Image (tube, rainbow, N blue to C red):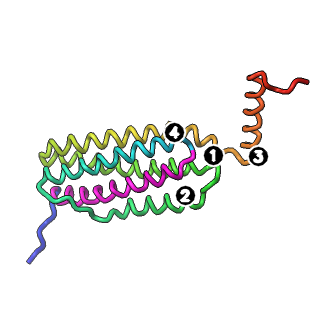
């Protein structure tokens, strides 16, 4: 007896399970990243997106309901790879000037994966006649794109800090301190 041929409906369900797993892992990764981030703006972006991602998990559960399937996760090898890479980078670059730049890059890799998956799921939901699911998936897609853009803005600023050598940073901090002292009128009189 021949196996049943797979359909777009099957592909949609399989990818939905994959993304459900990935999004739940993303929440954990974002919380860990927030704890590791030294830059306040980056930390806040991670904390905010962790909250958004928790809402996205709930939205995915609604999509499962719309298609009449139970919410089940399927191990997402891509997300496991991305989070594993993040763990390695966190360890390797901990306490270095580049640590936040590396964190932002890892987070963007996760965002780009999610953007690709949500874009596909939204398109397939429309094709399969799941208009309500497509709206939910699009809402998440827009949040992922917004987070990616925010991370890009933050990265532009922190990448400069991460590019400084330790001696450059010491000089920069000394210069900042000196200009603050002179600017406040509290500098030593000659």
Residue 124 lies left or right of residue 4; in this view the side is right
Labels 3 & 2 near each other (Cβ < 8 A): no
Task: Look at the numbered disc 4 and give the secondary structure of its residue.
Answer: helix
Q: Please state the horizontal and vertical placement of residue 60, each as a whole percent of the image.
A: 24, 51
* Number of the front mark, 1 or 4: 4
Gap in angstroms between the C-alphas marked 3 and 1 = 13 Å
Residue plotted at (41% across, 52% down): 110
Residue 154 lies left or right of residue 115; in this view the side is right
The span shown in magenta is: 9-38
Gap in angstroms between the C-alphas marked 2 and 1 = 14 Å
Q: Please state the horizontal and vertical placement of residue 190, each as a whole percent of the image.
A: 91, 24
First of labels 3, 1 by sequence position: 1
**Is 30 above or below relative to 40?**
below
Q: Which mark is residue 167?
A: 3
Q: Which residue is mark 4?
A: 41
First of labels 2, 4 by sequence position: 4
Q: In front: 48, or 124?
A: 48
Q: Main secondary structure of the magenta part?
A: helix
Mark 3 Cα shell of 10 Å, populated few (<14), some (14-19), many (≥20): few
Q: Which mark is residue 90?
A: 2
Q: Decide whether residue 26 is among the magenta residues.
A: yes
Labels 2 & 4 near each other (Cβ < 8 A): no
First of labels 1, 4 by sequence position: 4
């Amino acid at each position: 007896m021949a196996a049943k041929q797979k359909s777009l409906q099957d592909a949609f369900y399989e990818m939905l399970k994959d993304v459900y797993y990935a999004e739940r892992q993303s929440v954990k990764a974002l919380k860990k990243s927030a704890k590791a981030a030294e830059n306040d703006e980056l930390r806040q972006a991670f904390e905010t997106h962790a909250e958004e991602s928790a809402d996205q998990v709930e939205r995915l559960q609604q999509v499962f309901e719309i298609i009449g399937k139970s919410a089940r996760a399927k191990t997402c090898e891509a997300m496991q790879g991305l989070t594993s890479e993040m763990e390695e980078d966190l360890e390797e670059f901990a306490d270095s000037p580049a640590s936040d730049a590396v964190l932002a890059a890892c987070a963007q890799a996760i965002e780009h994966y999610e953007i690709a998956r949500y874009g596909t799921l939204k398109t397939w939901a429309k094709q399969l006649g799941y208009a309500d699911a497509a709206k939910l998936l699009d809402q998440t897609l827009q949040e992922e794109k917004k987070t990616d853009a925010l991370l890009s803005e933050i990265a532009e600023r922190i990448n400069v800090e991460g590019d400084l050598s330790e001696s450059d940073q010491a000089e920069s901090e000394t210069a900042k301190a000196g200009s603050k002292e002179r600017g406040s009128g509290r500098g030593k009189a000659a």
